[in-house]
């Protein structure tokens, strides 16, 4: 029951990463600190639609 989601940079709004998550156990939006090539730094990436 894992779905593919895309992670979007909170500053430049680019979709840089894709990952999976279990929607039954993790009901909120996923938020990770990842490297953004466009911003050239580690920024918060949030789950996008």
Image (spheres, helix red, strand yellow):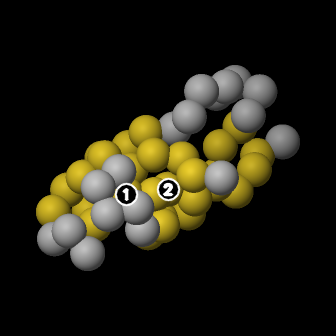
Residue 2 placed where, x, y %? 76, 46
Quarter of the rendering containing residue 26 = top right
Q: Nearer the viewer, residue 32 or 9?
A: 9
Q: Is residue 20 left or right of residue 18?
A: right
Q: Is residue 24 visible?
A: yes
Residue 17 placed where, x, y %? 48, 65
Q: Residue at x 75, y 50 (%)?
A: 3
Q: Is residue 19 visible?
A: no
Q: Is residue 21 left or right of residue 37?
A: right
Q: Are marks 2 and 1 in contact (CB under 8 Å)?
A: yes
Q: Residue at x 73, y 34 (%)?
A: 23
Q: Residue at x 31, y 46 (%)?
A: 44
Number of residues whose C-alpha sits closer than 10 Å to that of mark 2, classed few (under 14), some (14–19) or many (20 or more): many
Instruction: State the SS at label 1.
Output: strand
Q: Nearer the viewer, residue 13 or 5?
A: 13
Q: Residue furthest bottom?
A: 38
Labelled disc at residue 24: none
Q: Residue furthest front?
A: 12
Q: Residue at x 65, y 43 (%)?
A: 21
Residue 31 placed where, x, y %? 43, 39
Is 13 placed above or below 23 here? below
Q: Which residue is mark 1?
A: 9
Residue 47 placed where, x, y %? 54, 47
- Distance from the alpha carbon under mark 2 to that under mark 1: 7 Å
Count of numbered circles on the image: 2
Q: Is residue 1 left or right of residue 38?
A: right
Labelled disc at residue 7: 2
Number of residues whose C-alpha sits closer than 10 Å to that of mark 1, classed few (under 14), some (14–19) or many (20 or more): many
């Amino acid at each position: 029951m894992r779905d593919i989601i895309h992670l979007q940079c909170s500053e430049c709004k680019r979709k840089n990463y894709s990952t999976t998550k279990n929607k039954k156990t993790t009901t909120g939006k996923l938020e990770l600190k990842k490297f953004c090539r466009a911003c050239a730094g580690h920024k918060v990436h949030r789950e996008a639609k």
